[in-house]
Amino acid sequence: MRPGNAGANSAADHIEVLEEALAALDGLLGGPESLVVRADSAGSSYEFLDYACQAGVGFMVNVRVGRFADAVRAAHENPETVWTAAVRQNGEARQGAAVVELTEAVDLSGFPDRTRLIVRREPRHPGAQLTFEDIDGQRFTAFVTDQPDQDLAELDRLMRAHAGVEDRIRDQKQTGWGRLPSHDFAINTIWCQLAMIAANLLVWLGALGLDEHDPLRRAQPATLRYRLLHVAGKLTRSGRRTRLQLDRDWPWADQIVGLYRRLWALPTPA
């Protein structure tokens, strides 16, 4: 929780979050050098990126296209510019989308050494609002990175996977973030912590209890509540055992039973 006048691009806040993330991952991975931090354009401050480099963490961060508008327009209009076809998250071609590296065409002084600029263009989605940065009906996005991979399509795919963060924020709003209960800052802070615990439990519920091909594994909290968590049932006792009886005609009864069996079969934590 931050006060309402807090800036979105505060390097101090981003550094604190990164420090806490590294502390939480300590011992679970091979070390900071195996990590890459991704962020939207609010994380493109020089101070934050410098800190990431000092911590030994790679970065992929969105930047505003307007900062490099001349170079982007020149690359778009120059027929000799080689654009690489972009791909979706599953590796299939994204119709009409392409990426190009413009590192040598712009001034990246101020950014950490070995910073590269990658630009993506694609047709505007139906109904998308026009922006001043659109050119010939094409939407442009850009990010900077220190990753050495020469496969531009793969770098772009990895960066675009960051959009999953927006899905988590949406889910958080459905588990409590959307309705703070009090005018008191401390109470709302605790409320947000409880909401994050709830959201994490739902993620682990899907990861451990649902088949990877089950659509419910990617369902929003509201859907999980209705189909799995808020189902009417009855507890009965027989033969010194307690049983939960569910309506066998409930459309998702099989998923509930399978979920229970998978969770029950998990080994006891050491």
Image: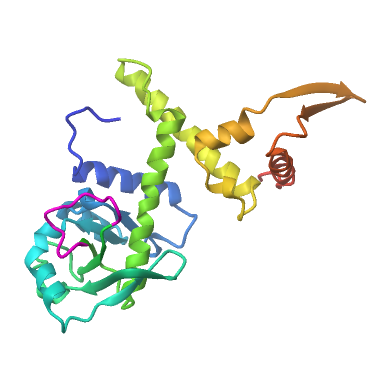
Q: Is residue 243 above or below residue 138?
A: above
Which residue sits at x=61%, y=55%?
213
Q: On the image, which quarter does residue 177 sit in? A: top left
Which residue sits at x=30%, y=20%?
185
Which residue sits at x=58%, y=31%?
226
Q: Is residue 65 above or below residue 230?
A: below
Residue 262: x and y, percent? 71, 46
* Stretch in magenta: 125-138
Residue 94: x and y, percent? 37, 68
Q: Is residue 191 above or below residue 6?
A: above
Which residue sits at x=16%, y=65%?
136
Asked if residue 253 lies in the magenta stretch, the reply is no
Left of 21 or right of it: where is 141? left
Residue 69: x and y, percent? 9, 63
Q: On the image, which quarter does residue 81 sit in? A: bottom left
Residue farthest to the front?
126
Residue 240: x and y, percent? 89, 24
**Along the line of sight, the residue nearer the viewer: 225 or 122:** 122
Left of 72 or right of it: where is 147? right
Q: Is residue 103 above or below residue 21?
A: below
Magenta segment main secondary structure: loop
Left of 257 or right of it: where is 199? left
**Along the line of sight, the residue nearer the viewer: 248 or 212:** 248
Q: How is the image coloured?
A: rainbow
